[in-house]
Amino acid sequence: MDKDLIDWIYTVSQADPKHENGGVLGSMTTPPPPEALKIVNHFISKNLGDPHLFKSLELITEKLVSLTRETLGLPPNMKGIITSGGTESNILALYSFRESLGVKKVVLTDVAHYSVLKASKMLNIYSEVVQTDFSGKFRPDDISKKIHGPSDSLVMTMGTTQLGGVEDPREILDDLNRVPIHVDAAFGGLTFPFINPEKFHGILRALISSGTNFTIGVDFHKFLGAPIPSGIIFVPEEIYPSLSFDVNYISSGKQFGLLGTRPGFSAAAALATLAYYGLDGLSKRAKLAYENTLWFLEEAKHRGLGFPVNRPEVPIACLSTDELIEREKLLEELAKRGFFVYRGEKCRGIRVVMMPHVRKSHLQRLLKAIEEVLISS
């Protein structure tokens, strides 16, 4: 055994920014609860791609799918498939549309997650991008005029990565002629229902009552804080078979999704994390993170440290700073001070994601650091 190399693996990680001290402010990652880490170790060698061999994983998956469906208020005919996260969910959504519904084109906005365009390229599905304004809003006519027939589809985002917006399909449903819609709720799926339940359930009711075939993907490893990788996609019962693939050498004879061998702890740890926080706990965390988001944007504006380009609907704060300082310089100087935020491309500034580990005290220190950088520049 090369003990020196093993020790080095631990040592080299010490240079990484820490979530707990507020250094990680742009990534949609957060530490899992200790109970979930115990579950990871317990299921580390079990393959979720062969649930008939590991019967516990079959039962756990059924429980996780049922609980998540109930949390989101989805109808019973929506079938859940465990995924590795939003990218796989987005690929599977477009694949199911292509295979079951003959989709050949996808329409999306310029603030959709990059993985939607990745999926369209991989699947040879033509894509059309609708431009949004500075705050990430689209004009309904710009979308509806790009939808021409039953071979078209639409992706809408619940919690845009860049601006924290929620794209509301109710504005255009009547003009879409029931084309299939994928709702990318990787971040918003376990935040937005607690922040604005009326709008969230209004969107779902409209999609269900319209008769539109829609899918929705949610990540457990983002705001919930389950160990990576962990997500789920819900698809209508009639297109569910398109995501099943024959595997003749395993007992079940089939697998769902892109991965063959899939980490067994994914579903188990996600369920444990849901159980640890409970819906009340998750709701409190989402509401607090959202309050901190609005506070941060207002405080930054009040101090003259940037301009909020929108009122986000999930806990993502984008601050326009390019008129004050060159963005790369700001990012570099903040990193020197131990604050790692992400670029805000659309807002021409910086983006802070209010994950559960981010406290108001961290944000106060970040604002002070921005102030110091601006003064010194």
Image (spheres, rainbow, N blue to C red):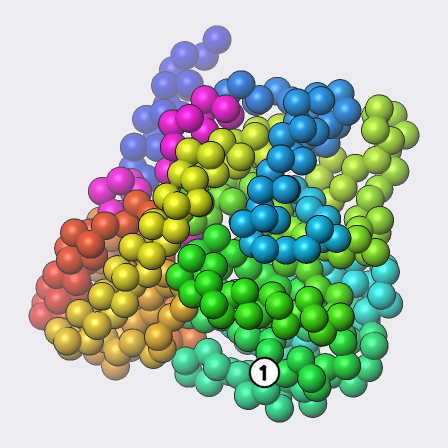
Using the rendered image of the protein, determine whether residue 74 is visible from the camera's viewpoint.
Answer: yes
Could you tell me how many numbered marks the image carries? 1
Residue at image location 45% in from the left, 71% down from the top: 165
Residue 354, horizontal then vertical, whole percent: 33, 56
Residue 262, horizontal then vertical, whole percent: 66, 33
Residue situated in front as seen by the camera: 123 or 228: 228
Residue situated in front as seen by the camera: 177 or 250: 177
Q: Quadrant of residue 84?
A: top right
- Please rate how many residues cluster around mark 1, counting C-alpha atoms within 10 Å: few if below 14, some from 14 to 19, many from 20: few
Using the rendered image of the protein, determine whether residue 348 is visible from the camera's viewpoint.
Answer: no
In the displayed structure image, the side of residue 122 where residue 110 appears, left or right: left
Residue at image location 70% in from the left, 29% down from the top: 58
Q: Quadrant of residue 299?
A: bottom left
Residue at image location 60% in from the left, 38% down from the top: 64
Residue 61, horizontal then vertical, whole percent: 65, 34
Give amino acid for label 1: Glu
Residue at image location 49% in from the left, 31% down from the top: 272
Residue situated in front as seen by the camera: 377 or 348: 348
Residue at disc 1, secondary structure: helix
Please give the range of residues in magenta: 17-40
Residue 373, horizontal then vertical, whole percent: 15, 65
Q: Residue furthest right?
A: 248
In the displayed structure image, the side of residue 143 where residue 33 appears, left or right: left
For the C terminus, the quadrant is bottom left
In the displayed structure image, the side of residue 121 where residue 376 appears, left or right: left
Which residue lies under the disc numbered 1?
Answer: 171
Any magenta on residue 32?
Answer: yes
In the picture shown, does residue 275 fall above or below 279?
Answer: above
Q: Quadrant of residue 5?
A: top left
In the picture shown, does residue 198 fall above or below 172?
Answer: above
Majority SS type along the magenta span: loop
